[in-house]
């Protein structure tokens, strides 16, 4: 088994898989689901130009107790839409943007920018796109055809050498490459780095994350490339909707949320008016 | 990589998702107004390849992907993973058996 499959298997084993049936639900778990307790969701601009979310008359707070604030209107509207999308019960596991904002605001693991950048660079050493298989031959070809272009794009765009390897130790990333990336990542603010870290964890690849953040890949493309080996196995053995599709859509949702979060957190939009030329 | 599909399709897709979330009066929501404003603002450009336009197009794709996959994921969850396990009684009933009873209850039960 390759590392990709091991990672996926590990995350899948943690989930309880149960058969669909027609009997009533058994009251087994202790998760008391919160009901939707508000009618309207609105946003308002508070002090410092930061936006807040209002559920009816109450201001939303983070799990850490802080006031929930976001730096721009677009992100506020997207978060408000997430809260508005909840029906009878609040399904927090579908509210990815809110979760990301909470993480950025509360910073429960007390990380700073440097630590996050170091962690991201460390991940490059076991990047999915750089970690190749030896066999079966079809998969080797597939990895070469799908992953090499992205790798080359990345190397060209940042003027670095990354390379790929099929040894168990993984690729040897030169220090110059790491320095270049460190310099680039330092230009991101804390919120954007939080989002980037999230995306890297989801896609299991720094290269694919950067490719998507730099708008070279769409979310669907990045997810497909991240799951390349799984897709290959699905093509061979068949698709299992309650596992494969379930995982894929969840990965898409989380990755899309992360990408949007990074873009909105680093956004500054200006309108340039060009003069009409006769 | 491959070119993104047209902004019109993405816009329609996002509105479809918003309608699925909000219901019939989705046009009054914050998201609707913001999205329409963004699409209108980014329509006009004289450049052949406008970087900002490519960025906005990619962002709109991302948001559409977010809305659509969240909804699909929830639907799959409801379909396959929302119901708990069978109780022992119903599991036994599936193969036509009944649970044994002991008059007076088992010693460790109360």
Image (spheres, coloured by chain):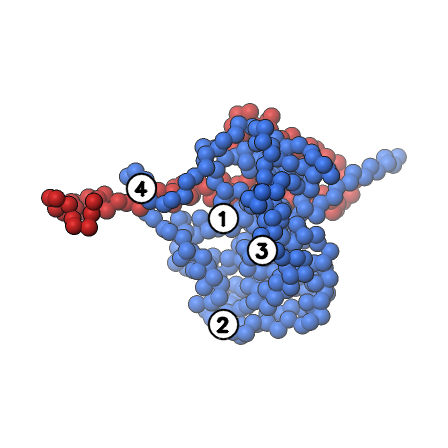
Chain colours: A blue, B red
For mark 2, name the chain: A
Secondary structure under the numbered disc 4 in the rendered image: loop
Tags 1 and 2 in contact by the CB under 8 Å rule? Answer: no
Classify 10 Å Cα crowding around label 3: few (below 14), some (14-19), many (20 and above): few
User: Looking at the image, is mark 4 or mark 2 nearer the viewer?
Assistant: 4
Of callouts 1 and 2, the N-terminal one = 2
CB within 8 Å, label 3 to label 1: no
| Disc 4 packing (10 Å; few <14; some 14–19; many ≥20) | few
Measure the alpha-carbon separation of dots 4 and 1: 25 Å
Q: Dot 3 corresponds to which residue?
A: A109
Q: CA distance from mark 4 to mark 2?
A: 47 Å
Between label 3 and label 1, give the one nearer the viewer. Answer: 3
Q: In what quadrant of the picture does the C terminus of chain A appear? A: top right
Residue drawn at point x = 58 percent, y = 42 percent: A65
Does label 4 or label 1 sit earlier along the sequence?
A: 4
Q: Which residue is mark 4?
A: A26
Residue at screen point 69% across, 71% down: A175
| Place of residue A137 in the rendered image (x, y in percent of width and height, measured from the top left) | 48, 69
Q: Secondary structure at mark 2?
A: loop
Which quadrant of the view contains residue A164?
Answer: bottom right
Separation of disc 1 and disc 2 at Cα? 29 Å
Q: Is residue B78 visible?
A: yes
CB atoms of marks 4 and 1 within 8 Å: no
Of pointers 3 and 1, the one earlier in the residue sequence? 3
Q: Chain of mark 3?
A: A
Of discs 3 and 4, which sits in the foreground?
3
- Secondary structure under the numbered disc 1 in the rendered image: helix
- The residue tagged 1 is A250
Point out residue A166 in the picture as x, y percentages from the top left corner. 54, 72
């Amino acid at each position: 088994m390759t590392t990709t499959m091991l990672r996926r298997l590990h995350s899948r084993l943690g989930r309880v898989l149960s058969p669909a049936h027609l009997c009533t639900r058994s009251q087994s778990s202790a998760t008391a689901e919160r009901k939707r307790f508000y009618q309207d969701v609105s946003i308002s601009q508070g002090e410092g130009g930061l936006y807040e979310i209002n559920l009816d008359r109450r201001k939303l707070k983070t799990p850490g107790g802080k006031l929930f604030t976001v730096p721009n209107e677009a992100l506020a509207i997207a978060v408000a839409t997430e809260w508005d999308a909840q029906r009878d019960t609040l399904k927090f596991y579908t509210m990815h943007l809110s979760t990301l904002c909470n993480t950025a605001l509360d910073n429960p693991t007390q990380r700073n920018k440097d630590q996050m950048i170091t962690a991201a660079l460390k991940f490059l050493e076991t990047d999915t796109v750089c970690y190749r298989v030896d066999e079966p031959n079809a998969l080797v070809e597939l990895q070469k055809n799908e992953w090499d272009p992205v790798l080359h794009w990345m190397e060209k765009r940042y003027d670095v050498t990354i390379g790929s390897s099929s040894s168990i130790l993984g690729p040897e990333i030169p220090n110059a490459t790491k320095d270049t990336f460190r310099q680039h990542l330092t230009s991101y603010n804390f919120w954007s780095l939080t989002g980037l870290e999230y995306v890297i964890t989801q896609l299991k690849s720094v290269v694919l994350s950067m490719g998507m953040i730099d708008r070279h890949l769409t979310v669907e493309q990045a997810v497909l490339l991240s799951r390349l080996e799984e897709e290959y196995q699905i093509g061979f053995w068949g698709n299992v909707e309650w596992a494969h599709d379930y995982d894929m859509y969840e990965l898409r949702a989380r990755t899309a949320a992360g990408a949007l979060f990074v873009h909105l957190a680093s956004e500054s939009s200006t309108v340039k008016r060009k003069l009409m030329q006769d | 990589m491959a070119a993104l599909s047209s902004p019109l399709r993405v816009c329609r897709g996002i509105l479809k998702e918003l309608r699925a979330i909000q219901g019939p009066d989705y046009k009054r929501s914050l998201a609707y107004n913001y999205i329409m404003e963004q699409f209108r603002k980014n329509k006009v450009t004289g450049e052949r390849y406008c970087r900002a336009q490519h960025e906005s197009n990619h962002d709109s794709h991302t948001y559409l992907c977010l809305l659509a996959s969240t909804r699909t994921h929830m639907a799959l969850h409801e379909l396959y993973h929302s119901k708990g396990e069978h109780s022992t009684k119903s599991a036994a009933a599936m193969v036509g058996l009944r649970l044994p009873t002991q008059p007076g209850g088992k010693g460790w039960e109360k």
